Image: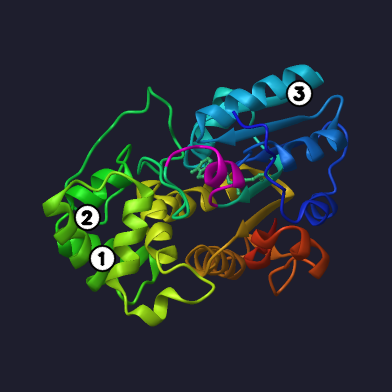
Amino acid sequence: MSDAIHTPVLLKEIVEIFDPQPGQIFVDATANGGGHTFALWEKVKPSGTVIAIDKDHDLIAGLKKKARDAGANVVSVQGSYAELPQILHAHGIEKVHGILLDLGYSSYHIDQAGRGFSFQKDEPLDMRYDNNPRTQRAEQSSYDGKLVNGITAEEVVNGFPEGDLADVIYRFGEERFSRRIARAIVEERKRERIRTSGRLAEIVRASLPSRFGRGRIHPATKTFQALRIFVNHELQDLEAVLPDAVEALMPQGKLAVISFHSLEDRIVKNFFRTQKQKGKLELFSKKPIQTSREEEKGNPRARSAKLRVAIKL
Ligand SMILES: C[S@@+](CC[C@H](N)C(=O)[O-])C[C@H]1O[C@@H](n2cnc3c(N)ncnc32)[C@H](O)[C@@H]1O
């Protein structure tokens, strides 16, 4: 587990919007280092509960220790938020006052996990959040749109047919050069298996027209995003949790989702809209809430954050 803290995004806003009261129950479905978790705990203590879920085994081990040291009633669960109903049921909880989803990866994954999340590092190409050794591995040799469990980025990059690789990079990275990149990967892997993030970043960079290598954004950004989203089936998990989260809220309970790119935000926006039409949810605000200039200065990642909140009717 890391000592470096992931700086929580929109922390003040989340606490203000949830307005937690002593004795209430909240779910932090993407707990990470507990930035939001413990801020919520401070408000619901001493009789309240925060259920803290994360896919990452190492992060959950750290959270458990932190909760124990603080004497906090934070129930840390290693698992996917896509299993929210089962997790709540296992802890004897029926309805909660609020649920937070702060999507994607964290500073810990980029800086310390050693799993190849960053194109700026040369690490084994893994990219799974769920590094639980007990997690069943169900490898697949091509992309057929189905949910995959346990597959690593290395297996995708070295094993998928060229067309499927291009589809993954296009669909989850919105990368317009997906075919060109997939071609280059397939050529390179014929010579030698691609094992590290550094090598992959270099192959992607070399496959693009040189003018794309000079900007502020690294040319492998979209390819890395695509592999991360695919390996962790991030969009499927998000689509699965939204209806279950609404179900788990008590009337007037709030669902808050912080997203970091348009693929995620589109899913949340459309879901909230259809639930509003069905009279199940009310929107907290019409437009997404974004970070202040001040927060962006201290935390560049916050710049792309969009928070959408809905209230259960
Ligand atoms: C942006 S971080 C959350 C940061 C946290 N809110 C904080 O401020 O300390 C997202 C976290 O979600 C976790 N995660 C991603 N997909 C998940 C899933 N399907 N179920 C549970 N956790 C997931 C990642 O492991 C990561 O730790």
Q: Is residue 208 above or below residue 160?
A: below
From which residue to which does the magenta span run? Answer: 104-115
Between the residue at mark 1 and the residue at mark 2, the CA separation in whole angstroms equals 8 Å
Q: List x then y, in percent, for residue 282.
A: 70, 64
Type of amino acid under label 2:
Tyr
* Residue 211 appears left or right of 22: left
Between the residue at mark 3 and the residue at mark 1, the CA separation in whole angstroms equals 44 Å
Q: Quadrant of residue 250?
A: top right
Q: List x then y, in percent, for residue 216.
A: 54, 73
Secondary element at tag 3? loop
Task: Determine which of the numbered discs, if any, sits on residue 245 in the image.
Answer: none
Residue 77 within the segment the image draws in magenta: no
Type of amino acid under label 3:
Asn
Q: Residues within 10 Å of mark 3 (few under 14, many from 20)?
A: some
**Residue that label 3 marks:** 73
Q: Splitting the image into four quadrants, where does ligand 1 fall?
A: top right
Q: List x then y, in percent, for residue 248.
A: 61, 42
* Residue 231 appears left or right of 246: left
**Residue that label 1 marks:** 167
Secondary element at tag 1? helix
- Along the line of sight, the residue nearer the viewer: 190 or 86: 190
User: Which residue is depicted at the point 88% across and 34% down?
Assistant: 22
